[in-house]
Image (cartoon, grey):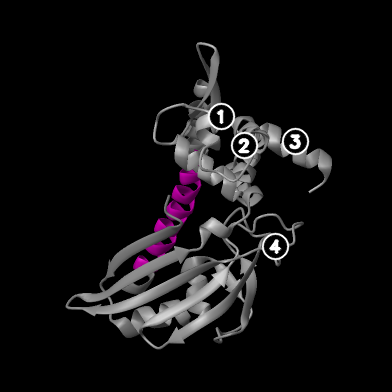
Amino acid sequence: MSQKNRKKAIASGRGRALVFAALGDDTRLLLIAKLCSGQPHSISELTEGSKLTRQAITKHLRVLQGAGIVHGVRAGRERRFRFDPEPMQDLKQYLNTISEQWDQALARLKSFVED
Amino acid sequence: MSDRIEKRIELKAPVSRVWRALTDYREFGEWFRVKLDGPFVAGQVSRGQITYPGYEHLKWEAVVQKLEPERLFSFTWHPYAVDPKVDYSKEPQTLVEFKLEKTPTGTRLLLTESGFDRIPAARRMEAFRMNDGGWTEQMKNIERHVTEKS
């Protein structure tokens, strides 16, 4: 895919490409795991117990934000990060689509062997 | 999130009949809608041309993994290899398995497709944009869903 086409694809896919790219990293998956418990977390909380620096975590959070998986929210003076399940539900939809194709193929197989 | 698809279907036909429908390349082509070049051979690439209306420009390619008579037929392939201009050969594949079991009324067929977690992101996106009759409505649903949220 050319650079231009890629940009077009991302735009038409409403950033879904970013979602998948964002998920393809272990650190970010860990961050998601922490955040998907429901409570918004601060950078300090997310850095806790990690070997990574605050700056590195911030960078990963930015990628997740860009993909819409994480949103920043203000809590007083503090900035917290909240998980959004929506983009990952899209992914599930993808599997559903393939699943439906199999349903159709198997239905054809059924009439093929039963006739 | 599950990375596999599982199906179970009861067929009112003997195992031997179902096995033939699955593994005879001409019969497979009938219901799967693909014109295959030749018989399935374990360990070898199977090639052909899709005959599904609207997708006739697509090639079929899979690597036959197991042919255990009347028990297991499996192959690996690239799901949604829908763009003839893209070289999918370097990408990871999913594994499709058909398992057969004899039942009092005929045959139970178990279908599994696994390994979706390894499929590159861009391809997953491609799948969303595929626009075939039954999917059009679904696509609209997704669009609506996403737009409302953003």
User: Which percent across, then down, holds residue B73?
Assistant: 44, 79
User: Which percent across, then down, holds residue B127?
Assistant: 58, 48
Q: Secondary structure at mark 3?
A: helix
In the foreground, B133 or A98:
A98
Q: Are marks 2 and 4 on the same chain?
A: no
Density class for disc 1 (Cα within 10 Å; few <14, some 14-19, many ≥20) is some
Q: Secondary structure at mark 2?
A: helix
- Residue A85 higher or lower than A76, as above or below: below
Name which residue lies at 31% across and 64% down: B8
Residue with the mark numbered 2: A57
User: Residue flagged by tag 1: what amino acid is it?
Assistant: Ile
Task: Identify the magenta region.
Answer: A90-111
Q: Secondary structure at mark 1?
A: helix
User: Residue flagged by tag 2: what amino acid is it?
Assistant: Ile
Magenta: main secondary structure equals: helix
Determine the CA span between mark 4 and mark 1: 39 Å
Asked if marks 2 and 3 touch (Cβ < 8 Å), the reply is no
* Side of B110 where B3 appears, left or right: right
Determine the CA span between mark 2 and mark 1: 7 Å
* Side of B66 where B10 appears, left or right: left
Density class for disc 3 (Cα within 10 Å; few <14, some 14-19, many ≥20) is few
Residue with the mark numbered 3: A8
In the foreground, B101 or A66:
A66
Q: Quick check: can you spot residue B127? A: no
- Residue B16 higher or lower than A20, as above or below: below
Q: Are marks 1 and 3 on the same chain?
A: yes
Q: Are marks 4 and 1 on the same chain?
A: no
Asked which quadrant contains residue B22, the reply is bottom left
